Structures are given as structure tokens and as C-alpha cells.
Image: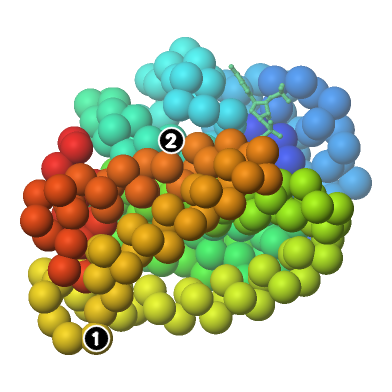
């Protein structure tokens, strides 16, 4: 019988997780659909399994890091009977609904399930700055904490298996909106010959400074205190966004990144709310569910 942590999926991320585990001196069993990727890890001394059945034959936790929700079912469904009584730690990116579906699937089969969402790129795994969100089985989170902590800071969001993913998705909304905003700005400057690299040197510290505003917005949202003193009004923000849209048009740049925010603010002004604070964008977003 093979012992140690089982890793199913050795793409860029699965390989990084397995490598950090092996480099920490812990035994591991690895499997990948394309066996070449398992062979690439061989010099670090894992047990390389030829099949999923062989990979799960031991008694350690089973770490799953595959492409998506579908591929998790593709790999686990055929061996579900052999997983009863075992712990599956699924680090594949899934939506909250998919994570909850997998938790229910596992519960029906006597499998302990811990869902994870990785807040890092493969090169960061096992290094400072890497964090992984978890939710699902509290017992599994506690029991396997030494393993989880090899990969990065471990944050537990409670027994609802969807909460790690929901927090992940919320974090990524901010990230993608920021990236898109940066690329929009870079496109505006490119029209007049400014290289994106030059812009990035100015944009990065500015965005870092602006991130300091988030706590204030959050306090306003949680208190629903949009009429409180010292807030930038929706009317002020509308004028600023309108200037950005006009400049984008003048530079020949599509303003699709910003237009929905402008529309959100204008709807509120039309409803007579223009004197309230800009953080009220939050309330308008929630009404479109
Ligand atoms: P890769 O594309 O490098 O690897 C995908 C893995 O999934 C491979 O091992 C692939 O096997 C396997 N796979 C895909 N479909 C199937 C299937 N139907 N049956 C069996 N195996 C399958 O992706 P990553 O390793 O980068 O990402 C893995 C997960 O980690 C994803 O959910 C991703 O969102 C998440 N993640 C990745 C981050 C990153 O920066 N890379 C950051 C945060 C999360 P094969 O080699 O045979 O094709």
C-alpha cells in the first residue's frame, strides 16, 4: 500500500503543490492523465501511480487540482466507491455552486470534503505571499493543517463548502476589474505614443495608494450610511466618469470597461439619489440580481 498525500492533477498548479510537499520532506503519490507530467516530478521521489485507482490506494488525504468542476467529476466518479472514508481536498477552481455540489456528492458517498481556492500563482506556492482559502470539513482543515500550511497561509471560512470559492470569486472580480482598467488607461495613452511600461510605473503605486480607500467604502456599505458627511457624491462621480468616457472617445478607445459603472451612477441620479455617496454603487449592483 502506498502512503502519503495523493495528488490528482499535475498541471502547473498541481505540480507546484506536489513539489512543495515533497520538498518539505513529506511522502506523496502523484497521478496525471498525461503521464509525462508525473515523470517530470519523478526526481523528487514521489510514488508515481499509473492509474487513479492506484493513486488512491493508500490512506492519506487526496489533493485534487484539475482543470475545472467537470474534470473533477471525470476523475473522481469512476473511483467514488474507493473514496469512502477518505478525505478529498479539492483545490480546483470551482464556483460556489459547484463546490457545494461536490460537497453534497462527497457526503452522499461517505467522503470527507474540504474545498480550497488558491490565491497565488504556481511560482508562489510554498513562498511568502501565497494564501489558500478553505471551507467545508473543519475536522479535515485542522487534521491536515501542516500539509496545507506548506503551500501558503491557510484561511478557513467555515463548514459551507461554497464559501472559499465565493471569497475567491469576489477577490477576482476586483483583480480583473483592476487589470481591465489599467489596460483601458494604457490604450488611451498608446494613442499618443506613451508605452504601457511607462504608464505601469505610474499606475501601480497610484492603485496601491487608492486601495487604502477600500476600508472607508466598506464601512459606509456595512453601515448603509450613504448620506454621511465627507463622501464623494454620485453626482461628482458621474461628472468624473463622463469626462473619462469623453476622453476615451476622443482617443478612439472603447469605454466598455467604464460604461456600466457610469450607467449605474446615472440610474441613481435619475432616481433622485445623486447627493448620496458613491459607495451606493453597491446597492444599485445588488438590485440587478
Ligand atoms: P493546467 O492547465 O496547467 O493543468 C490542468 C490539469 O487538469 C492537468 O493536470 C490536466 O491533465 C488536468 N485535466 C484537465 N481535464 C481533465 C480531465 N477531463 N481528466 C483528467 N485530467 C484533466 O492548469 P493549472 O494546474 O494551472 O490549474 C489547475 C487548477 O488550479 C485550475 O482549476 C485553476 O483555476 C487553479 N488555479 C490555477 C492558478 C494558476 O495560476 N495556474 C491560480 C489559482 C488557481 P493533462 O496534463 O493530462 O492535460
Label 2 sits on residue? 94
Tag nearer the camera, 1 or 2: 1
> Is disc 1 in contact with disc 2, using a CB cutoff of under 8 Å?
no
Q: Position of residue 254 (x, y in %)?
A: 58, 37
Q: Secondary structure at mark 2?
A: loop
Instruction: Classify mark 2 as within 8 Å of ligand 1 or not, answering yes or no.
Output: yes
Label 1 sits on residue? 230
Marks counted in the figure total: 2
Residue at image location 34% in from the left, 30% down from the top: 98
* Quarter occupied by residue 231: bottom left
Residue at image location 45% in from the left, 26% down from the top: 69
* Quarter occupied by residue 23: bottom right
Q: In the rendered image, which quarter contains the C terminus?
A: top left
Residue at image location 63% in from the left, 45% down from the top: 250
Q: Is residue 261 above or below residue 55?
A: below
Label 1 neighbour load within 10 Å: few <14, some 14-19, many 20+? few
Amino acid at each position: 500500500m502506498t502512503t502519503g498525500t495523493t495528488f490528482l492533477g499535475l498541471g502547473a498548479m498541481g505540480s507546484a503543490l506536489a513539489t512543495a510537499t515533497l520538498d518539505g520532506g513529506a511522502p506523496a503519490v502523484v497521478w496525471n492523465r498525461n503521464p509525462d507530467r508525473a515523470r517530470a516530478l519523478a526526481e523528487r521521489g514521489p510514488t508515481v501511480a499509473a492509474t487513479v485507482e492506484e493513486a488512491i490506494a493508500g490512506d492519506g488525504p487526496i489533493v485534487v487540482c484539475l482543470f475545472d468542476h467537470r474534470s473533477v467529476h471525470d476523475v473522481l466518479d469512476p473511483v467514488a466507491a474507493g473514496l469512502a472514508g477518505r478525505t478529498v481536498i479539492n483545490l480546483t477552481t470551482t464556483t460556489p455552486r459547484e463546490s457545494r455540489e461536490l460537497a453534497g456528492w462527497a457526503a452522499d458517498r461517505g467522503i470527507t470534503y474540504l474545498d480550497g481556492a488558491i490565491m497565488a500563482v504556481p511560482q508562489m506556492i510554498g513562498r511568502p505571499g501565497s494564501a489558500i482559502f478553505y471551507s467545508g470539513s473543519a475536522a479535515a482543515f485542522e487534521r491536515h493543517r501542516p500539509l496545507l500550511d506548506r503551500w501558503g497561509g491557510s484561511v478557513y471560512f467555515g463548514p459551507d463548502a461554497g464559501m472559499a470559492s465565493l471569497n475567491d470569486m469576489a477577490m477576482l472580480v476586483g483583480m480583473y476589474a483592476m487589470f481591465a482598467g489599467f489596460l483601458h488607461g494604457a490604450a488611451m495613452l498608446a494613442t499618443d505614443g506613451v508605452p504601457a511600461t511607462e504608464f505601469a510605473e505610474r499606475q501601480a503605486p497610484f492603485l496601491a495608494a487608492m486601495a487604502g480607500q477600500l476600508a472607508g467604502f466598506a464601512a459606509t456599505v456595512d453601515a448603509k450610511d450613504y448620506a454621511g458627511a465627507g463622501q464623494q457624491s454620485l453626482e461628482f462621480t458621474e461628472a468624473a466618469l463622463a469626462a473619462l468616457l469623453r476622453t476615451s472617445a476622443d482617443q478612439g478607445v472603447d469605454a466598455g470597461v467604464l460604461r456600466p459603472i457610469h450607467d449605474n451612477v446615472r440610474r441613481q441620479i435619475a432616481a433622485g439619489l445623486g447627493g448620496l455617496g458613491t459607495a451606493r454603487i453597491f446597492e444599485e449592483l445588488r438590485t440587478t440580481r
